[in-house]
Amino acid sequence: MNNGDIIAMRSYPSPSDTVELYEITYWSERTRVKGLLGIPREPTADGLLYLRGGMQRIGMVRPARIVQYAQQGFVVFAPYYRGNRGGGGRDEFVGVDRFDAVHGVTVLRKFMTANVYVIGFSRGGAMALWTAILRDDIRAVVSWAGMTNIALTYQERLDMRRMMKRVIGGTPTKVPEAYAMRTPLERVNNIKARILIIHGKRDEHVSFKHAEQLASAANGRADTWYYSEFAHAFPPKENREVVRALSEWMREGSV
């Protein structure tokens, strides 16, 4: 098996009559990984890799979110990441699991023919940046409320420290290299794709500092949409408006 090869594909219940859903099992670094694929019934050529936040069951891919983006005219694929929903291996919190996203693009390309875009939410922000760093076929990458500095996350999120020490192998002081290798900021200049940063300034889950550090690392190459009134999750109406707007932004200049 090669990375990105599909091992199994089964129909998945869809909350929409306009989008078909399938659960995909695919090969990633010698590990079986699962994800959710959304295909609009209206013909489309563009693909979107959606990278979830959270860890294990928290922040798991939701069919409604996949449908939301598919209704914008994308074939959408959202990896669960290894160690989740019956997938093999262990979720390493932006460790080797970043390749589940990288090879997820290969899966996505089997179902579309034009441009590939990447969106990462929360923890998925770091995953999205690594995908754009490690692949040169990404047209645009969006970090929405995105985690960009893993050591900063450890400092800010007291509720995540036990998990991070267990998964990563210690604290940022004891194993600084493990946190540095997960943090994409020093490699952002390697990204060829257009970059968009979306962040609420009242975000208490992923602080606004993450957006500021990413913008600084991008050296003026990133577009920024900052919202002073919003926290980590945007209200439903505004969320829908931002999804429509970022879908238009991603397609700007695409051929």
Image (cartoon, grey):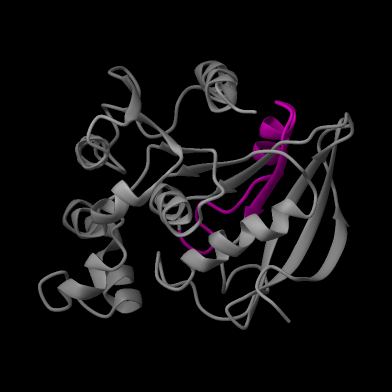
Q: Is residue 9 magenta?
A: no
Give the residue at x 57% y 74%. Answer: 83
63 on left or right of 158: right
Give the residue at x 68% y 66%. Answer: 34
- Above/below status of 239 relative to 181: above
176 on left or right of 236: left
The span picked out in magenta is 55-78
- Above/below status of 122 relative to 154: above
Return the x and y of residue 189 as percentages of the image width and height. 30, 47
Give the residue at x 46% y 61%. Answer: 55
How many labels, in total? 0
Q: Quadrant of residue 23?
A: bottom right
The quarter of the picture where the N terminus appears is bottom right
Q: Nearer the viewer, residue 35 or 117?
A: 117
Residue furthest left as drawn? 173
Q: Nearer the viewer, residue 207 or 198?
A: 198
Q: Nearer the viewer, residue 109 or 227?
A: 109
- Above/below status of 67 relative to 130: above
- Above/below status of 202 relative to 146: above
Return the x and y of residue 181 as percentages of the image width and height. 28, 68
The quarter of the picture where the C terminus appears is top right
Return the x and y of residue 190 as percentages of the image width and height. 35, 51
